[in-house]
Image: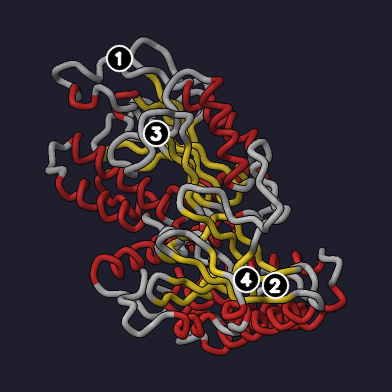
Amino acid sequence: MNAETESLLEKALKHVMEESAKLLQRDDLIDLRPVAVALNKLASETHQVRVDGVHRLKSVPSLIILAKSAEHLCDDISEKNWKYIPMSVSAIYENIEASLRPAKGEKGAAAELRSHYDKIRIRLLQQALGAKMLDSISDRGAEIERVWQQFLQNALGDTVRVLQGGVICDYQGNASKHQIDLIVVPTEALVTFPSGAEDGKVHVPIDQVISAIMVTSNLTAAKLRTDWEKLIAIPEYTEKTDANDHPQLKDHPWPLRYIVGAQSDPIETLGEAWVKAAESFKGPAPEFVVTLDSGFLYSGATKWPRPQFPRKEVTDVRAEEGVYRGLGLAWLLLQHQGRLAVLHRRALGPINRQAKALNYASLKNATPPTWSPRFYTGFQPHEVAGIFEWAWREKHVHNRLLLTALNRKGEHPLFKEGFSQSLTSPFNFTGQRWFRYGAKHTSGDLVALEEWFDIESPDKHSTRIAVFNAVSGEELTGPEIDALKQVSEVERLVPPTAGAAIT
């Protein structure tokens, strides 16, 4: 589970720095200096935990305390200055704590699977970065290719050979126009011109190829496009659907095509490059684009075995990053194993079950690990009582005060006497009445709410208790209502025999 925790710590450090940067851009920065100092300490402590090594980490209560203290300090200043300062950092640390306590069953197994492949990803990245220290550009390229070659050979075993550098040809004299960095073939493949050819490259017949892989140390958007074009230039396997070949793979690409890299442009940038390449080139798209530092890409056109979504369109590209980055390696290996199982007429059940496990490991929570419910109101119930409900209009006056509009079901929010909402201006807030969200009490047919006035002013704001008949919608007024100080005091307006409360 260490790899998952490591990924969350990396995300936590980035998130704290982003929250700190937001504070630095505010006009009231001078007042928020204590919060900025607290966030700096939290970032420093998080960095130290990473330096010490995740394998030693058992729990993070000290980081959670620091995060919650920073939030509490921010809320105090927000309330004092009567300003909304949405800063949240504790949720990611609570998720880190949860990652250190593995779940049981499928959920725990999925986390272990993600962690396993993320460790492999990190190890490969370290090897690739080491290769970049070589002086010669050609030596660096060859060494990074060897890193991937050894990984594939070790992972796939002696059922395949992973050839480094060569061209793919057919039986009519056509050959790929560019060198393919890695070519994976079955062990028994009939490689017709092993490295004694005039051009010094291995020549492999198309019907002997499992996959063609382009390898780079730094995958840019431009390089992705170039490598995509090189993979398209591989000759077609025209005999694939003949009875003696592989008719069951009629709609599947041959060979499998991949673009892999060590470091890369941001995954979003590569995604945009994928769409442009797919729109520009005719021919099979790569099954996966995998980068060790950023993540991996695939599209709706990716074939079995594959992630469950998206489907069909090659331009419908999906990017996976964060703790899911290592699963790109898992899918790449599983596609090779799937192709080998078909070629050798083996049972496909194990491939399908592994694909199901990878799909489950790819499932994400409904919210990112940095998400906090502190200021989010989308999941809050809108029922008040009877025909009344909280409207969708809301306002955080400060971090501890959420005000919401009120409406009778099917109608516009309530406005002060003398104001009405223009039908041509649905976002007109002038004259709207505001109530503290959740501050309500029902008694019989009555519902009492806490109403706020002059909400922009920390000095002039005031409150009162408003009472409505939740059945008829009528608002009650008079000295008895004016005398109410708390919503619970509505109880004294209703005789004890009035019946059950409205819900």
The residue at the far front in this view is 478
Split into 4 quadrants, where in the image is the C terminus?
bottom left
Q: Are marks 3 and 1 in contact (CB under 8 Å)?
A: no
Q: Circle 3 sits on which residue?
A: 300
Question: What SS does tag 2 mark?
Answer: strand
Question: What SS does tag 1 mark?
Answer: loop
Name which residue lies at 54% across and 33% down: 274
Q: Name the front one of labels 4 and 1.
A: 4
CA separation, marks 2 and 3? 45 Å
Q: Are marks 4 and 2 in contact (CB under 8 Å)?
A: no
Q: Name the front one of labels 3 and 1.
A: 3
CA separation, marks 2 and 1? 68 Å
- Marking on residue 451: 4
Q: Name the front one of labels 2 and 1.
A: 2
Name which residue lies at 37% across and 65% down: 116
Residue 480 visible in the snapshot? yes
- Going by the numbered disc 1, the residue's amino acid type is Thr
137 vs 361, nearest the viewer: 361
Q: Circle 2 sits on which residue?
A: 398
- Going by the numbered disc 2, the residue's amino acid type is His
Mark 4 or mark 1: whose residue is earlier in sequence: 1
- Marking on residue 238: 1
Looking at the picture, how far across and down is residue 326, in whole percent? 44, 56
Mark 4 or mark 3: whose residue is earlier in sequence: 3
- Going by the numbered disc 3, the residue's amino acid type is Gly
Looking at the picture, how far across and down is residue 405, in whole percent? 59, 60
Name which residue lies at 53% across and 77% down: 93
Is residue 190 positioned above or below 13 on the image?
A: above
